[in-house]
Image (cartoon, rainbow, N blue to C red):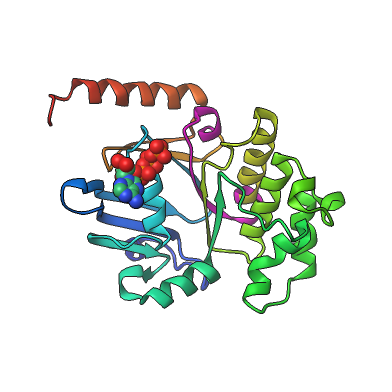
Amino acid sequence: MTVTDTQPAPPPTRPVIAARAVDVVKTHGRGEAAVRALDSASVTIPAGDFTAVMGPSGSGKSTLIHTLAGLDDIDSGQVFVGDTDLGALSERGRTLLRRERLGFVFQAFNLIPALTAAENIALPLTLAGKRPDPAWTDELVHMLGLQTRLDHRPAQLSGGQQQRVAVGRALIARPELVFADEPTGNLDSRAGAALLTFLRDATRSFGQTIVMVTHDPVAAAYADRVVFLADGRIVDELTGPTAETVLARLARLDVSRRDEPVGA
Ligand SMILES: Nc1ncnc2c1ncn2[C@@H]1O[C@H](COP(=O)(O)OP(=O)(O)OP(=O)(O)O)[C@@H](O)[C@H]1O
């Protein structure tokens, strides 16, 4: 039975499920250097939720969000963004899907140095030849607290401000889904807290769906749900996390990995 058999009809443009990975296997490299980064990984990302992805280094977190975003080809399994099966799209189709339906925030802010904050935020629309919606741009800039920084170039902004510009850029085109890979990794704890509060508020106030990879239990506690990866599989999940409950699950994960026989 599929989800749509049991749920009320979703709004026309936003499905109830924002993205889904089904039994995804992904190998990086070839031959002796081959690494199975995802080993039959399945996960569902509900629309409007803030989901954190956690797990030990090398467990496949970045690979999972790259495959959900259609950035990586997969060996087998299926990936859906909304109702769209990424496997049925051409390379160009996936590029268009990313441009039109997804947003990205990275640990390194990846802003264009020669452009002002306002121009960096508007970039996805500029590239797509679309006009910004002034009311939405204004709301976003206010929520991000960037009103007085719009004419500044990245080098004239603090790390926290640069990352808020990057978040503005990710949200300006109102994507269905935003992927954030360690977005607070280069921020001090105060700037990190401000950014995470904004991300959480974005899910509450305008239903933004966010998937965030993090190593930090405090950051994960801002999410609605945490999914835990180990050895390329989703092994656990936690709803309504706190830093303490996340830490306890991570510790349990470590213990169960240590208990595995060598070579298993
Ligand atoms: N391009 C690549 N070529 C070869 N191996 C890769 C490549 N990218 C990732 N891997 C390997 O795949 C596995 C999963 O990597 P991935 O980056 O998804 O893990 P991660 O959980 O995000 O790690 P981290 O927390 O350290 O960032 C690791 O063993 C990694 O070394």
Tell me if residue 191 comes above or below residue 249 in the rendering. Answer: below
Identify the residue at image location x=76%, y=56%: 117
Residue toward you, 12 or 141:
141
Residue numbers of the magenta segment: 203-221
Q: Does 86 lie within the magenta span?
A: no
Whole-percent x, y for residue 152 in the image: 82, 53
How many marks do you count on the picture?
Answer: 0
User: Taking the image as drawn, is residue 227 in sight?
Assistant: no
Identify the residue at image location x=82%, y=55%: 150
Identify the residue at image location x=44%, y=27%: 246
For residue 143, side relative to residue 208 (left or right): right
Whole-percent x, y for residue 226 in the image: 43, 38
Whole-percent x, y for residue 194 in the image: 69, 37
Placement of the C terminus among the 4 image quadrants: top left
- Quadrant of res 132: bottom right
For residue 50, side relative to residue 76 (left or right): right
Q: Does 205 lie within the magenta span?
A: yes
Tell me if residue 250 comes above or below residue 70 in the rendering. Answer: above
Q: Quadrant of ligand 1?
A: top left
Residue toward you, 48 or 146:
146
Residue toward you, 205 or 118:
118
